Amino acid sequence: MFEITAVSHTEQNYAAMERICIVGDSYILFYRTILSAYIFPIPQITAQLNKEEFLNFLSQKCSTVEYYK
C-alpha cells in the first residue's frame, strides 16, 4: 500500500497491518496501529479490482480481518 503526497511518500506492507475491518459494501479500514487507519471506499476499489479476489488477498496477508454489516 502506498500513500504519495506532495511532501511525503509512505509505503505500508499489508502483512504489517494490525487489523483490517471490512464494513459491508461501504468501506475498508486498514489499521496500522490502534490510533491510525487508512479508509478505502469499497466502490472505488471494486471499480478497479474484483472485490472477492481483493478480500481473499487481504485475508491471506493480515492475521486479523473483521467483517461488519
Image: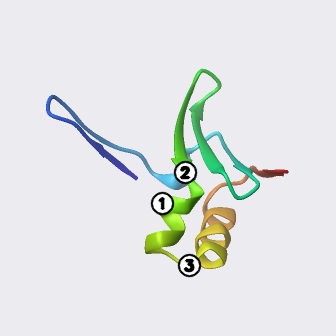
Q: Nearer the viewer's eye, disc 2 or disc 3?
A: 2
Which x, y percent locates residue 28? 62, 49
Q: Is residue 44 above or below residue 53?
A: above
Q: Which residue is mark 1?
A: 44
The residue sitting at 20% across, 32% down in the picture is 8
Q: CA distance from mark 2 to mark 3?
A: 14 Å
Q: Is residue 33 left or right of residue 23?
A: left
**Residue at (15% x, 28% y) in the render:** 7
Residue assigned mark 3: 50
Vertical comparison of 50 with 43: above or below: below
Report the front residue among 2 and 51.
51
Disc 2 vs disc 1: Cβ atoms closer than 8 Å? yes
Amino acid type assigned to the residue bearing label 1 in the image: Gln
User: How many residues crowd around disc 1 within 10 Å: few (fewer than 14), some, or many (20 or more)?
Assistant: few
Determine the residue located farthest toward the left in the rendered image.
6
Provide the secondary structure element on which disc 2 rests: strand
Q: Residues within 10 Å of mark 2 (few under 14, many from 20)?
A: few
Q: Position of residue 58 (x, y in %)?
A: 62, 63
The percent position of residue 45, horizontal first and vertical second, equals 50, 63
| Mark 3 surroundings: few (<14), some (14-19) or many (≥20) residues within 10 A | few
**Is 11 displayed left or right of 19 in the figure?**
left
Amino acid type at image mark 2: Pro
